Image: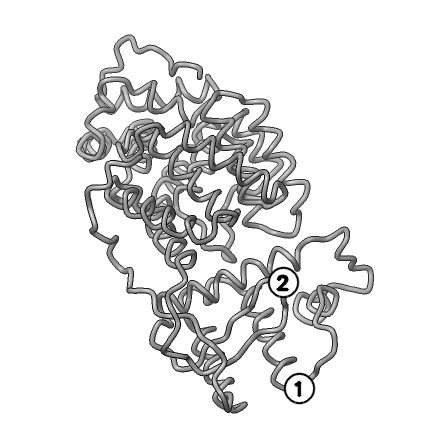
Amino acid sequence: MTTDSTSEQPSGLQPVKPRPEPASGGPSTDEVARQLSVILSSSRFRRSPVLRRILGFVIEETVRGDRGTLDATAIARGALGKGDSFRSSRDASVRVAMNRLRTALALYYATEGAADDIVIALEPGSNRPVIAFRSTDQTADPACEAIVIVEAYQEIITPKASALALRALRAALEAQPDNPQLLAAYTDICLDAYKFRLGTVERPLEEAAGALERAKMVDPQNPAVRFQCGMFALAHDELAAAAQCGRELVRDYPTDPAIMLGGSWLLAHTANPTRVARDHDLCLPEDTSLPGWMNHARFLASYHAREYEAALSAAIDFGMPHFFWGAIDKTAALAQLGLRDAARRQLTRLLDLNPHLVENPRWHLGHHIKHQGTLEHVLEGLCRAGLGTGSFPTPRRL
C-alpha cells in the first residue's frame, strides 16, 4: 500500500495521447521523411546516435518497399556497421537496441510527439515499423504512461513523484501484469521508498520482493530485471550476489553502454570503487537517457582515490537538485578540497532536503556505500563540513 495522497505531476509531463491505429491511405514518402526528421531532432533521440541510426535504417527499408527480412543481421550490418561475423545468437546488441527503440518511440509520442499527426511505432516482436496517421479513437497505453512518469520520478526522487509513479505503475500492471519492464520499475521505486524513507509504500521490501519474483518468472534474462536483482541484493547487504549481477551484466552486454554502466554501477557500490573504475568506464555515455544519479559511481571512484576535483565534477554532473544524494557528494568533495564556506552552504542545503540525515548519517550512506573504507571517508568529508557524526550504528542487516 502507499500513502497515495497527491495527484500532482512532476513538472514537464504532458498528458499521454492515444496510440495510433493505421488509417486508410497512409502517409506519403515525403510526409514520412518529415516526421522522421521531427523525431530525430527531439530531445529523446538527439542524445542517442545509435537509436537514430537504427530508426533511419528501418524507416528507409520500409518506405522503399523492401519486403525482405528485416532481421537482426540486416540491422546489425546496415545500421550498426557490424561485419559478416555478426551472429544474433552470440551478440544481443540488436535485440537490446530494438527494445530500447520501441520504448523510445512510445515515450516520444507520449510526450514531445503527443500532437503529431503521423505516428511511427514498433509492435512487439517486429523490427519493421508501422507508419500511420494518428487515429482519434484509441485509448491511452497505461504502460507507456507509467514509464514516462517513472522517468520523471527518477530525475527528482521526491515523495510526491514516488506516489504518482506508484499509482501509474499499479494501473499499468493491472492491464499488463506480466510486463517485465513495469515489474522492474515497480521493484526499483519500492526499494527507493525504503532506502530514502519516502513514506510512499507501507511495506516496501515485501512489495519489492513480490514484484521482482514475478519479473524473474516472466523474463529472467531481461536486463532491467537483472539490474533490479542486483539492487535488491544490495539493499539486503548481499554484496556477493549484487556484485555477481554486476559482473554478469558487464559480461553479457559488452556492446550496450547503458547496461554496461548499470553493471559497473553495481560493482562500484560493492567493492573498491577506484579498482572498479580502472576496469570499467563509469562515465555516463551520450547514447543513453540514464538519470543523473548514475554519476554517483564515478564520484565514489574519484573520491576514494582522493581525486577530489574529479569527485566534485561528478557530483555536479549528478544534477537532480531536489534529491539529497547529490548534495551529499558535493558537500563531501567541497570539504575535502578545503572549501569550507562552500561546503557549509551545501551542508545546509543537504539538511534542508533531508533533515533526518543528522540523526543517523551512517544509516543513510550505508545503503549505497558498502565499501567500509569509502563509507568512513565520505563521513569524514561531511564531518569536516560541520556535520557532527557522533556514534551512529551501522545499517541493520536484513
Quarter residue 386 falls in: top left
Which element carries disc 1, helix, strand or loop?
A: loop
| Circle 2 Cα neighbour tier, 10 Å, few/some/many (<14 / 14–19 / ≥20) | few
**Left or right for 311, reference 273:** left
Quarter residue 195 falls in: top left
Residue 97 vs residue 350, the one in the foreground: 97
User: Residue drawn at (52%, 47%), measured in percent from left and top?
Assistant: 178
**Left or right for 164, reference 318:** left
**Label 1, label 2: how many angstroms apart (C-alpha)?**
20 Å
Residue 270, given in percent of the width and then of the height, sits at 52, 26
Residue 120, given in percent of the width and then of the height, sits at 50, 75
Quarter residue 363 falls in: top left
Residue hosting label 1: 65
Which element carries disc 2, helix, strand or loop?
A: loop
Residue hosting label 2: 125
Residue 7 vs residue 303, the one in the foreground: 7
Which sits earlier in the primary sequence, circle 1 or circle 2?
1
Residue 318 vs residue 98, the one in the foreground: 98
